[in-house]
Amino acid sequence: MSSPVILWFRQDLRLHDLPALHAAAQAGDVLPVFVLDDDAAGAWTPGGASRWWLHHSLAELAASIREAGGELSLRRGDTATALLALCDSVGATQVFCSRRYEPWAAAQESAVNERLAAAGIGIKRYGGALLHEPGSVLTKGGDPFKVFTPFWRACRREPIGAPKEMPTVRWAASRPRSESLDDWELLPHSPNWAEGWETLWAPGEAGASARLNQFLEESVQTYADQRDLPAIDATSRLSPHLHHGELSPRQIWAVCEQYKDAYPEASASVGKFQAELGWREFSYHLLHFFPTIPEDPFKANFAGFPWSTNHEHLERWRRGMTGYPIVDAGMRELWHTGYMHNRVRMVVASFLCKHLLIHWLEGERWFWDTLLDADLASNGCSWQWVAGSGADAAPYFRIFNPITQGEKFDKSGGYVRRWVPEIADLPNKYLHSPWETPADILEHTGIVLGEHYPKPIVDHRSARQAALDAYEVVKISNTAAA
């Protein structure tokens, strides 16, 4: 009997359209393993919400492999050590895996390759997490794109391979020891802040497929018009599934292309959705070429920005107690569901950076711990985009007005009333600026501002001017440096 080949699962928790699995299946009997290596990522070890999803996704993956005739081996600790021990126990000489793009993951792959090679074990990496591998889409001068529109135009000119079904796999007969998923304690308890999430989300490959189909059947035709309305379930909510690799962007792309062929009238709306895959792609390519993006400003002059260190303001932002209803609704949605609507993400991020003048790193770290879809690339690039310090960034003087944003995108107040029930009885006219509510209406509703719901922690106009003044400091320092 030939020795098995190791399939090292990483952030690719699926069996379909997985190039590493296809290659491993052609090489021999496949022995799947997942290694929980909390030290490898350093400061970017998955946060609490991601670990909740990881638990359920691994359980689904293990069940799928078991149903197909295999057994997923779970190991915890240093990845190279775990893989070497597994190879030694079953006599494996080959390891297959999917590529990851975070800076720490590249360093991990290098270290694993070095240690395995010293033991006479080969390791082969494959793509599958992106439409195009970093380095394959460049400017005419051979440089990485720093602006989204030309990047996406170039991506559209490159062919996108068709996704593949699950191959015929001979699963290894070996059943090496496996740790217990429950022993990893990825789920919260005492308190269980994720209570009820199982009714909101369906982690795993089957759940990802079901969610994609539901989006195409119910929402994609109106996506372009309704995607900015947080009170409506008009977005795909596929980002946590993509983050954990439960389906590939290539699968999504192919299904969207088929949909456009079947419903040409929906092509523009579907194309708008596909462009969101493009933004994810853009972020990963940026991270590959500029690996300090999660921690350092992309625009160097922002290193001198006069950020505030107001801990009370930061805590009130985290808890959804700023006194600005659309901001507070978003932060509470995040805490209670592990998710936040994309339009609202921009509003709350702008509020933190430009109303409170608190460093975007604080927001990035909070999102990292609380978001189910906390991609290092998308999280870092998006925060820098809002702050004005990133690639293709929003101009710093573009400061989202939380009042008008609420009035425009939550006109009927359904989103705010759901997440900020303390002021649900206010008329729409005052819902997004409750401090302007006449005294007689407040008395009629029984709402006491400052007691039932906080007054604004900053004045919008004053905060906006303070942000513009701070930006002048950056411009002046940049001019001096030049």
Image (tube, rainbow, N blue to C red):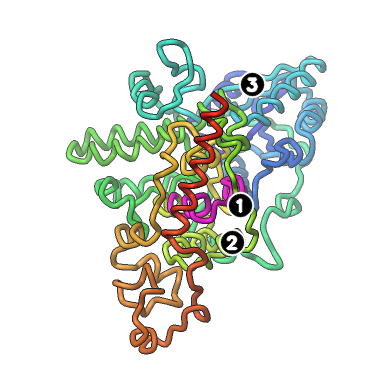
In front of the other: 257 or 41: 41
Question: For the residue carrying disc 3, how many other residues have a C-alpha within 10 Å: few (<14), some (14-19), or many (20+)?
Answer: some
Q: Say which residue label 2 marks.
A: 313
Q: CA distance from mark 1 to mark 2?
A: 10 Å
Q: Kindly report which numbered mark, 3 or 1, lies closer to the viewer in this rendering.
A: 1
Q: In the picture provided, is 132 more to the left or to the right than 429?
A: right
In percent of width and height, residue 186 lies at 69, 53
Q: Is residue 140 above or below residue 171?
A: above
In percent of width and height, residue 233 lies at 35, 57
Amino acid type shown at disc 1: Ser
Q: Quadrant of residue 93?
A: top right
Q: Which mark is residue 308?
A: 1
Marks 3,2: beta carbons within 8 A: no
Q: Say which residue label 3 marks.
A: 28
Q: Which mark is residue 450?
A: none
Q: Is residue 336 above or below residue 80?
A: below
Q: Is residue 148 magenta?
A: no
Q: Residue at x 51, y 78 (%)?
A: 450
The stretch of residues the image draws in magenta is 346-365
Q: Is residue 104 above or below residue 38?
A: above
Amino acid type shown at disc 2: His
In front of the other: 386 or 26: 386
Judged from the image, the secondary structure of the residue bearing numbered disc 1 is loop
Q: Is residue 363 magenta?
A: yes
Marks 1,2: beta carbons within 8 A: yes
